[in-house]
């Protein structure tokens, strides 16, 4: 018999599977117990840790044979490496995957030292390569055309608005997922947002007409849940999650022809943000202006130029094209 949910005030309670004699633990209560143990951290950090662990727990518990519950022996290095590979495949950035590793590592130490239910830390020895930060993807002109065509052909007002905020406003996937109606000021002629869920760094973002128009059309007739406080909703939740946005892009690319798919198969939502940065620089934006617009700021509100530089770094392809301009 699967275990019933425990009292939230108690730490996870071990139960026995009558058929196999295997020890099960309640994921939800374990995570809440761990969250209580790090209550000295800032509330926003605790929220991030809790959300990251829940997403990992849901993925791990859904694997074949796991019966939607957690056994200590399931938390292995192989399983965690597979999870990181899934995140990479779905377009999550290096920094995000590094954060996931840090959170799971801290949780594993707690399971070892405080709960005595884990033998070794599954994250130990795992390296997450950072080359991806050195060469952010710039979309080719043909890729931009195909992406925009696919979005238009889909006839999905919600999808058009999501794409517009990435492509025309350089928004992070978290900016889009957590955007609230009270922070959305969009009408027939004006458009600006108050965004910045990541790290709690909020900023006001004026929108190009292409983004304003798409968001306005969606709000007018996009079949969103009007009782939800969030702009982007789904059929199953009051808020379209980050995973939901990644899934939307995968579904969109799945509607492409064979030739179109070859152009777009590696493109992620975060690439839209990188590409926006390159187009803005090409249009004459300074690094300081771009840093503010993208939300790359220090705790004191100053532009974090070094972060923005990574988004606008010269690629090998660009240098190859410049070589052709050299004269004898």
Image (tube, rainbow, N blue to C red):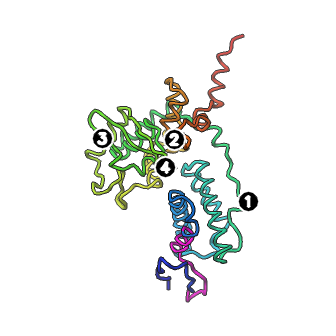
- The residue at the point 56 percent across, 85 percent down is 15
Bounds of the magenta span? 17-35
Kindly check if marks 2 and 4 are in contact, taking CB atoms under 8 A apart as contact: no
| 31 drawn magenta | yes
Check disc 3: other Cα within 10 Å, few if <14, some if 14-19, many if 20+: many
**Location of residue 236 with respect to 146 vertically, above or below:** below
Horizontal relation, residue 138 to residue 180: left or right: right
| 323 drawn magenta | no
Mark number, residue 269: none
**Location of residue 218 with respect to 40 vertically, above or below:** above
Picture coordinates of residue 71, whole percent (x, y): 60, 76
* Separation of marks 2 and 4 at Cα, in angstroms: 32 Å
Of marks 2 and 3, the one in the foreground: 3
Task: Label 4: state its secondary structure.
Answer: helix
Check disc 2: other Cα within 10 Å, few if <14, some if 14-19, many if 20+: some
Q: Earlier in the sequence, mark 1 or mark 3?
A: 1
Kindly check if marks 1 and 2 are in contact, taking CB atoms under 8 A apart as contact: no
Q: Which residue is mark 1?
A: 125
* Separation of marks 1 and 2 at Cα, in angstroms: 33 Å
Q: Which residue is mark 3?
A: 216
Mark number, residue 200: 4
- The residue at the point 68 percent across, 15 percent down is 326
Q: Earlier in the sequence, mark 3 or mark 4?
A: 4
Of residues 114 and 212, the one drawn nearer to the viewer in this rendering: 114
Kindly check if marks 3 and 4 are in contact, taking CB atoms under 8 A apart as contact: no
Mark number, residue 264: 2
* Quadrant of the rendering where the C terminus is positioned: top right
* Separation of marks 2 and 3 at Cα, in angstroms: 27 Å
Horizontal relation, residue 103 to residue 205: left or right: right
Q: How many marks?
A: 4
């Amino acid at each position: 018999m699967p275990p019933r949910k425990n009292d939230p005030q108690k730490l996870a309670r071990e139960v026995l599977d009558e058929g196999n004699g295997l020890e099960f633990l309640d994921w939800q209560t374990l995570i809440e117990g761990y969250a209580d143990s790090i209550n000295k951290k800032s509330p926003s950090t605790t929220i991030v840790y809790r959300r990251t662990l829940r997403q990992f727990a849901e993925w791990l518990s859904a694997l074949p044979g796991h019966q939607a519950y957690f056994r200590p022996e399931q938390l292995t290095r192989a399983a965690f490496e597979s999870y990181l590979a899934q995140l990479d495949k779905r377009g999550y950035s290096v920094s995000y995957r590094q954060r996931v590793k840090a959170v799971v590592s801290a949780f594993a130490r707690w399971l070892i030292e405080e709960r005595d239910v884990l033998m070794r830390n599954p994250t130990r020895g795992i390296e997450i390569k950072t080359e991806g930060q050195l060469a952010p993807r710039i979309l080719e002109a043909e890729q931009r055309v195909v992406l925009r065509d696919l979005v238009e052909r889909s006839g999905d007002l919600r999808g058009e608005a999501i794409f517009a905020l990435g492509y025309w406003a350089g928004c992070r996937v978290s900016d889009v997922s957590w955007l609230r109606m009270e922070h959305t000021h969009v009408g027939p002629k004006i458009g600006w947002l108050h965004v910045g869920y990541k790290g709690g760094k909020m900023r006001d973002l004026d929108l190009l007409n292409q983004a304003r128009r798409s968001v306005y059309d969606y709000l007018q007739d996009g079949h969103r849940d009007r009782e939800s406080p969030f702009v982007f909703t789904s059929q199953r939740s009051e808020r379209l999650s980050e995973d939901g946005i990644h899934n939307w892009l995968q579904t969109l690319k799945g509607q492409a022809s064979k030739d179109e798919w070859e152009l777009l198969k590696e493109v992620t939502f975060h690439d839209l943000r990188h590409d926006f940065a390159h187009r803005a620089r090409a249009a004459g934006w300074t690094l300081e202006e771009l840093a503010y617009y993208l939300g790359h700021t220090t705790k004191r509100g100053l532009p974090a130029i070094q972060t923005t530089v990574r988004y606008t770094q010269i690629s090998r392809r660009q240098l190859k094209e410049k070589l052709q301009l050299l004269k004898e």
